[in-house]
Image (cartoon, helix red, strand yellow):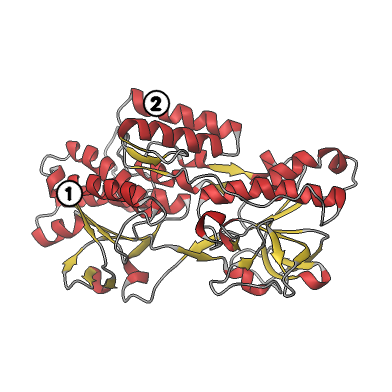
């Protein structure tokens, strides 16, 4: 969406005169701003406000709500499938002159017994809202049940994967649950058990070691059980079996253990690296088999293997900071190539700024890495984290709505009522027939 917005601005007059056509193909009719999903799960942001309707923002662009099934760049053709669930495929052929690939990534899963039955993902608005409701329902269950084992399982929350998504989601939900137990007469914050499982030797692998260590210390101060160099071996029967030998029951298992490139990329004739990402030059042009730029093909974001000069040419990490910066540069380079040809002098190399990442750890708490190499924690980091993501959100209206959400959260107490599941209607014979 970000690349399309910049291209729309640069081609606006040509688009209106019919001299150019801009088409965006995306299975969903909206952009989900993933960095704020943790605050959706915590209830501080309305779920509708982290999604941006594509057609509202891309007014000069043809938006097709469909899924690309195949790309044949050699003939400049792509096929899209607009069929709904359970419907027969109805492929549509699309011709093009310039291809911009930005399909992003999907959640990476593992063949862990019981994961499919008991695990939850955290990559969509629906999953974030569902997780929030589930956590609150577990508190209600723990308050009501007289079974000690069931109560302990309901109050145990396991997150697998300690990247930005896992750390942010756990910290925000722990903060929300700590507030929510005030309304439960027989639960205290100390009764809650939060477990973070990470296969490597540190959390927040994309952050500086110092900031990662500080975040780890903060989590442990809040009694979060962080297991490093540990993997989930099984979740069968709702019993978590970890590689360190521990076994315990938990009714909440959240899988946030990384991402992988969108499988769509395998259905193209473009060169991929060993991880399944499109091989790119620093200019964001797709790298052809001959080692030169492939004419008319560009890529950015999680699905593009763009060399990072700060990492000795290794591909950029799949995160929002790189994605937005690459999208802006890609659009500028495409416009330069359209004006002066593929070898135009205006085509620039991607040189990312110093990492400026951050993650929220609950209301008033965060950790942040500044562009000058400094580190912030606490409330200052929290304000910086919010300001960064508000600036990156590609919709002025959504920025205002989220600001209002934050203001209302500061003025009033949190809403801690689960509302995600539809109410079951009573059958007529079960309805209360008492008068009044």
Q: Secondary structure at mark 1?
A: loop
Is 433 located above or below residue 298 in the figure? above
x then y, percent, for residue 91? 74, 69
Q: CA distance from mark 1 to mark 2?
A: 29 Å
Q: Earlier in the sequence, mark 1 or mark 2?
A: 1
Q: Secondary structure at mark 2?
A: helix
x then y, percent, for residue 211? 33, 46
**Looking at the image, is mark 1 or mark 2 nearer the viewer?**
1
x then y, percent, for residue 67? 65, 63
Residue that label 1 marks? 223
Q: Is residue 282 left or right of residue 230?
A: right
Are circles 1 and 2 on residues that touch, CB within 8 Å?
no
**Quick one: 425 or 164, which is closer to the camera?**
164
- Classify 10 Å Cα crowding around label 1: few (below 14), some (14-19), many (20 and above): some
Asked whether the viewer can see residue 251, the reply is yes
Is 353 located above or below residue 121 in the figure? above
Residue that label 2 marks? 408
**Quick one: 341 or 130, which is closer to the camera?**
341
Residue drawn at 68 percent across, 65 percent down: 68
**Quick one: 50 or 371, which is closer to the camera?**
371
Looking at this view, name the residue that lies furthest to the front: 312
């Amino acid at each position: 969406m970000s690349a399309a917005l910049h291209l729309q601005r640069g081609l606006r007059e040509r688009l209106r005169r019919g001299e150019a056509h801009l088409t965006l193909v995306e299975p969903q009719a909206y952009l989900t701003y993933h960095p704020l999903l943790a605050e959706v799960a915590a209830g501080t942001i309305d779920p509708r406000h982290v999604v941006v309707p594509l057609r509202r923002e891309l007014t000069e662009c043809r938006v097709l709500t469909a899924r690309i099934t195949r790309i044949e760049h050699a003939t400049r053709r792509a096929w899209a499938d607009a069929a709904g669930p359970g419907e027969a495929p109805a492929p549509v052929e699309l011709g093009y002159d310039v291809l911009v690939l930005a399909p992003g990534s999907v959640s990476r899963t593992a063949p862990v017994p019981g994961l499919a039955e008991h695990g939850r993902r955290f990559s969509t608005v629906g999953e974030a809202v569902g997780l929030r409701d589930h956590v609150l329902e577990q508190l209600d269950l723990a308050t009501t049940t007289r079974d000690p084992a069931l109560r302990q399982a309901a109050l145990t929350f396991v997150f697998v994967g300690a990247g930005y998504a896992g750390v942010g989601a756990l910290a925000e939900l722990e903060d929300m649950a700590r507030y929510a137990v005030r309304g439960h007469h027989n639960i205290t914050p100390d009764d809650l058990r939060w477990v973070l499982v990470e296969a490597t030797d540190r959390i927040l692998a994309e952050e500086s070691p110092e900031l990662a260590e500080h975040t780890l210390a903060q989590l442990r101060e809040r009694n979060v059980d962080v297991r490093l160099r540990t993997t989930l071996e099984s979740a069968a029967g709702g019993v978590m079996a970890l590689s360190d030998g521990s076994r315990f029951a938990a009714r909440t298992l959240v899988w946030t253990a990384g991402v992988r490139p969108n499988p769509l990329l395998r259905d193209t004739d473009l060169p991929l690296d060993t991880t399944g990402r499109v091989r790119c030059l620093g200019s964001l042009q797709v790298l052809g088999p001959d080692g030169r730029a492939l004419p008319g093909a560009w890529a950015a974001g999680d699905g593009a293997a763009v060399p990072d000069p700060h990492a000795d040419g290794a591909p950029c990490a799949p995160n929002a900071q790189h994605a937005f910066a690459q999208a802006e540069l890609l659009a500028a380079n495409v416009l330069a190539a359209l004006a002066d040809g593929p070898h135009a002098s205006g085509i620039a190399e991607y040189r990312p700024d110093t990492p400026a990442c951050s993650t929220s750890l609950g209301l008033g708490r965060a950790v942040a890495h500044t562009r000058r190499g400094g580190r912030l924690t606490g409330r200052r980091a929290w304000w910086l984290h919010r300001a960064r993501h508000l600036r990156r959100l590609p919709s002025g209206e959504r920025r205002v709505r989220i600001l209002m959400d934050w203001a209302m959260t500061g003025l009033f107490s949190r809403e801690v009522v689960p509302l995600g599941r539809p109410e079951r209607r009573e059958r007529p014979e079960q309805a209360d027939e008492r008068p009044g």
